[in-house]
Image: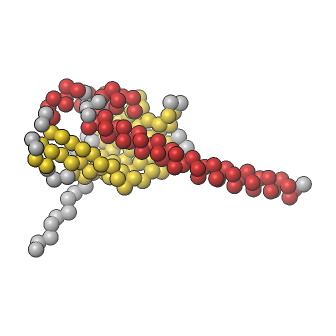
Amino acid sequence: MLLRRCILIAALLVSAISISAQTEPEANGEIRSLVHTMLEAQRNYDSPRLNSVFTTDFIEISPLGEVDSREKVLGFYSPAEKKKMDGVKVTVEASDYSIRQYDEFAIVIVRLTFNVEAKGMAMPPREMRATIVCRKGNVGWKIASAHYTGIRENPKKPA
């Protein structure tokens, strides 16, 4: 009887580990998609879309080190602000993802490469790292905070 219980418990543990391993990549895909949605909404100054992916208590640390409330961030990405960027085209590439999930929370570290074209002229790419905290709720994953840190350019070596 004891042997049967031990075998049953071992089988349950193995299946639980197997199920956990299967669901992790799925959650990582959802989280990557969420980050992509945020980046596209920022690029397009789509404040309503950002509103839908941020938690109600979202907070951001800007690349300048400022602590910005949800309202301030949404205001910055309002369509009126986009008019100030006429003639500027920005693309963002996300790479080097590190996603660590802890039940209903996930921490994402991602490298962002910004390619800017102003009045038809390409500017040197700019890079930063973002640390993004996501929280899973009743309606899926949302972004609770973001912290941006610029990556210094490597100085060119003399020839």
Task: Determine whether 140 is above or below 114 in the image.
Answer: above
**Colour style of the rendered protein structure:** secondary structure
Asked whether, in this view, residue 22 is left or right of residue 41, the answer is right
The residue drawn where x is 41% and y is 41% is: 33
Asked whether, in this view, residue 85 is left or right of residue 53, the answer is left
The image shows residue 80 at horizontal and vertical percentages of: 19, 25
Residue 10's image quarter?
bottom right
* Quarter occupied by the N terminus: bottom right
Quick one: which residue is furthest to the bottom in this view? Answer: 159
* Quarter occupied by the C terminus: bottom left
The image shows residue 28 at horizontal and vertical percentages of: 48, 47
Asked whether, in this view, residue 138 is left or right of residue 66, the answer is right
Task: Determine whether 140 is above or below 24 in the image.
Answer: above
Residue 60's image quarter?
top left
Of residues 109 and 25, the one nearer the viewer is 25
Is residue 150 shown to the viewer in this render?
no
The residue drawn where x is 31% and y is 34% is: 41
Of residues 152 and 159, the one nearer the viewer is 159
The image shows residue 44 at horizontal and vertical percentages of: 26, 34
The image shows residue 53 at horizontal and vertical percentages of: 40, 33
Is residue 77 shown to the viewer in this render?
yes
Q: Give the number of marks.
A: 0
The residue drawn where x is 52% and y is 45% is: 26
Of residues 51 and 32, the one nearer the viewer is 32
The residue drawn where x is 26% and y is 37% is: 43
Quick one: which residue is furthest to the front in this view? Answer: 120
